Structure formats: C-alpha cells, structure tokens
Image (tube, rainbow, N blue to C red):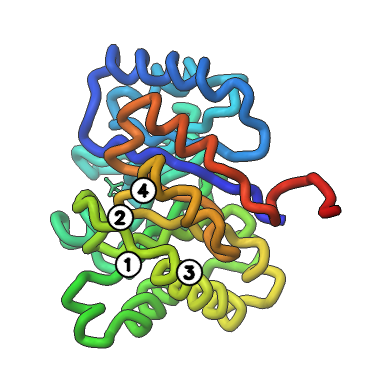
C-alpha cells in the first residue's frame, strides 16, 4: 500500500525565525502522526535550520528547486549534492511557477530529476495543465508529454524514489480546486501512463499527489479517491493549524487497518 504523503510548499515566504517557529509548532501538532509522510519545503536560506530542527522527527525537508550540475561556474545556483549535504530528502521540481515565470522546459526539468536521483534525493515532479490547455482539449496530451519527458532515462528501480504531483495550473493559489472527480480522472490517467512507461509494479507503488488550493475543508474528499496519494499544499501550509488539519485528514476505509465487520 502507498503511504500517503503531505508536502507543504512554502514558496517565497518566511524568515529563518518564522520558519523555525512554524516547524516548532508542527513538531508539536504532528507528533502523533505515523501513517502519513510529512514534508516541508522552506526557502533556501531557512533549509539548514529547518533540517537541524526536524532531525530525528517525522518531518522531512524538501528544497523547492535545484540546478542539474553538481558544481562549477554557475553563479547563484544550488546543486542536488549540496541539498543532500544540508539534510534535505526531497526536491520539488517542475513546479508550474518555475515553468511559467522562469521558462523551465521539460528537458531541463528532466536533467534536474536525474541529478536529484543521482544525489540520493527524491524528486517531487510537478506536472499540470493550464486552463487554456484544458479548455482546448489538450489536457491528457500535456500531462503525457510532461510525464514522459520529465521521467526520461529514469529507471524502474529509481522510480521507488520518485513522487509525482498533479497540479492543475488554474487551481494553484486561486482558491479553485479541481473537483475530486476531475483530479481522480487525471490521477488514474497518470497511473496508466506509468504502467506503459515502466510496468504494473511501478504504477502501483508510485505516489501521485494532488496540488492546487488544498485546504482542511477539501482534503478528505480528495484523499477518498483511490489514486490520490497525498497533497502538495501551498498557501495552507504556511499556517500550522491548517497544515496539521490537512495531515490529519479523515482516513478513507482503504487506509484504515480496522477490519471490516
Ligand atoms: P496552493 O499552491 O495550495 O496555494 O494552491 C499549491 C502549489 O503551488 O503547490
């Protein structure tokens, strides 16, 4: 069974002091959580302190980006081995804000995925369509393209470390969530693609997160869908109460260990 994963993407928010305060409060509120993997992604400057703080806890740390080369004359960049050295376990890659604001293309994102895996870290590869693409009937084509290119040259063995995040661009930061049916349809499609690109085992083991205006009020409905294995949370992850409520989502029956009567 796939272990649910809830990741908080803090984007460009929080000083070191504010990040420390949020993690302290999460460590307290999430101390009881055993059945959900918890990840937080602070800005680069807060990574060392958050990594130290969350050592030996259930909270794992992600970076929000990295550069595919390991070292060299690349002013202003940070590489995957340096993120591993800092104590990170995950790296968010291909986020729609990187694709749109920094013009990141699938080939470049794929280089990053490969460098993150080579450094022993786990990529959270984000894919998703714009509203324009959805409206013009290109949804499945866009998803297939981003997934295929993003995972080029990744082996079935390496896929145990890969997490996919489906984030419809029109639902990010807009308060507009895809309905659980809309999300479930794309998640099932992604799982089918993984089966074609790799095999049944990879498709069954890979976690596919949903992202886009996830809140305490809609996480239960989303997690009730069989192919939704967690969430990548932006805005609501900046608040300890909300993020904790999301991590404590009501468990659907398939995730409960209680035998049915
Ligand atoms: P949001 O962001 O939850 O604020 O919509 C999600 C994301 O960008 O990962």
Quick check: can you spot residue 157?
Answer: yes
Residue behind label 2 places its C-beta within 8 angstroms of ligand 1: yes
Mark sitting on residue 95: 2
Which residue does the image show at 54% across and 24% down from the upper left? Answer: 30
Alpha carbon distance from label 1 to label 2: 9 Å
Q: In which quarter of the image is the N terminus?
A: bottom right
Separation of disc 3 and disc 2 at Cα?
20 Å
Q: Is residue 31 left or right of residue 97?
A: right
Alpha carbon distance from label 4 to label 2: 16 Å
Q: Residue at x 17, y 60 (%)?
A: 100
How many angstroms separate mark 4 from mark 3 (CA)? Answer: 14 Å
N-terminal-most mark, 4 or 1 = 1
Q: Where is residue 64 in the image (x, y as percent from the top left)?
A: 33, 42
Residue to which mark 3 is pinned = 184
Can you tell which of label 4 and label 2 is closer to the viewer? 4
Instruction: Decide if residue 152 is on the left or right side of residue 129.
Output: right
For label 1, the residue is 128
Q: Are marks 4 and 1 in contact (CB under 8 Å)?
A: no
Residue 170 rendering spot, x and y as whole percentages = 22, 63
């Amino acid at each position: 069974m796939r272990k649910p994963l809830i990741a908080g993407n803090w984007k460009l928010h929080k000083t070191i002091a504010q990040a420390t305060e949020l993690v302290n409060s999460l460590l307290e509120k999430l101390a009881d959580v055993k059945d959900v993997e918890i990840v937080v992604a602070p800005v680069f400057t807060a990574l060392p302190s958050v990594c130290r703080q969350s050592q030996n806890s259930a909270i794992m740390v992600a970076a929000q980006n990295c550069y595919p080369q390991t070292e060299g004359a690349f002013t202003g960049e940070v590489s995957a081995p340096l993120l591993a050295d800092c104590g990170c376990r995950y790296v968010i890659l291909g986020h729609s804000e990187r694709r749109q604001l920094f013009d990141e293309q699938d080939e470049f994102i794929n280089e990053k995925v490969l460098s993150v895996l080579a450094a022993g870290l786990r990529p959270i590869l984000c894919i998703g369509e714009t509203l324009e693409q959805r409206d013009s009937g290109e949804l499945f084509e866009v998803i297939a393209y981003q997934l295929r290119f993003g995972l080029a040259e990744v082996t079935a063995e390496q896929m145990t470390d890969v997490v996919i995040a489906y984030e419809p661009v029109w639902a990010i930061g807009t308060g507009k969530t895809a309905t659980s049916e809309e999300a479930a349809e794309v998640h099932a499609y992604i799982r089918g693609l993984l089966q074609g690109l790799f095999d049944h085992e990879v498709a069954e083991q890979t976690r596919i997160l949903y992202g886009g205006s996830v809140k305490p009020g809609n996480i239960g409905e989303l997690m009730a869908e069989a192919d939704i294995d967690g969430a990548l949370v932006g805005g609501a992850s900046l608040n300890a109460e909300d993020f904790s409520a999301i991590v404590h989502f009501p468990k659907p029956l398939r995730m409960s260990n209680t035998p049915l009567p």
